[in-house]
Amino acid sequence: MSDTAPNLALPAGRYEMMLMIRLLEERIARLFQEGKIHGTAHLCIGQEACAVGAVSAAQRTDPIVSTHRGHGHFLARSADPAALMAELLGKVTGPCMGRGGSQHLCSRDLAFYGTNGITGGGIPIATGLALSQKLDKTALAVLCFFGDGAANQGTFHESLNMASIWNLPVVYICENNLYAMSTPIRESMRVSEVADRAAAYGLEAMRLDGMDVDEVREGVGVALRRARAGEGPTLVEAKCYRFCGHSKSDRLVYRSREEEERWRRRDPISSYRERLISRGLRQDELRQLERRAAQRIERAYEQAQAAEEPAPQQVLVPPYRKVDTGP
């Protein structure tokens, strides 16, 4: 088996990418505990199917706008865990030369227009990107990720209204993990589902199982084809569950262990593994994929640790420019 990046067009590739995201997030959690990464981070453990399913449905040049919980989105697009790890460790080999970190992770080369520490902050950015695609008459469509909490922000309502009026090529993907930090969605909305809000703006709505990578891929693929055909934006609601806390300091006192266990039985990775076996993939082939994913994350960490620290002269230089740091 070669060491090429996982092919997300193939079920085995999607399985391997979800594994890489899970293993990377678990390593990041340990690095925070060891004091090797600073600031904050919001892990997407449990939500891997949303990232892999949606990104695998897009073209490589379709712009992506992410959230504060965006490591999975970036890795699904880049397939480069070393770059992501380097950014979090503050090294120059990160896409923002170590200055963006978890909350401001961005790469124009990958058409990845940023994680965002502001709830709902990426939604108007994605809408503007979609407007630029329409004005430039490109064949691209924008993927915009956000959480259920962001659906209560003004930026959500204003952006969806604008995108609908102007018929913009954008797919709004709500990763509804049931909690906005610690607030359950039932306490912050009178409608039962985020997708219900699409009707107010004349948008197409789609409800997906966010724990099923193939369902997410198929549904987002339909929405992207609509956008490219000039049929306007779609609001996709993908129901999912984060197995970890909101952030690294969350003790999860607001939800029951019984609820967590119910969702863990629907783990998107283990359930997809069972599906692949039922489709004829052998156990030894799966174990080989799992070993390779683990090796990639280990190598990524080693490469990121060995990378250069940024020089003081680079602090005010845009990340896409290189400067002579002297002897």
Image (cartoon, rainbow, N blue to C red):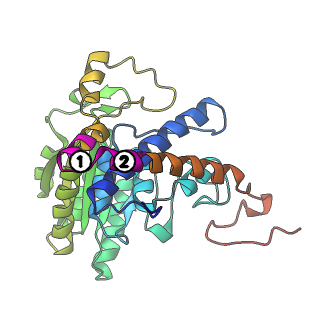
Q: Which residue is mark 1?
A: 276
Q: Residue 18: give its label.
A: 2
Q: Quadrant of the N terminus?
A: bottom left
Image position, residue 38 (x, y; %)? 63, 38
Element type at marker 2? helix
Task: Indicate the amino acid at tag 1.
Answer: Leu
In the drawing, does residue 72 fall left or right of residue 149? Answer: right
> Residue at (10%, 51%) from the top-left corner?
199
- State the extent of the magenta-drawn residues as a range: 273-290
For residue 113, say whether it is visible.
no
In the drawing, does residue 203 fall left or right of residue 277? Answer: left
Q: Is residue 202 above or below residue 294?
A: below
Image position, residue 109 (x, y; %)? 49, 71
In the drawing, does residue 74 fall left or right of residue 12? Answer: right
> Residue at (13%, 53%) from the top-left corner?
205
Nearer to us in this view, 318 or 56: 56
- Furthest toward the right, the residue is 327
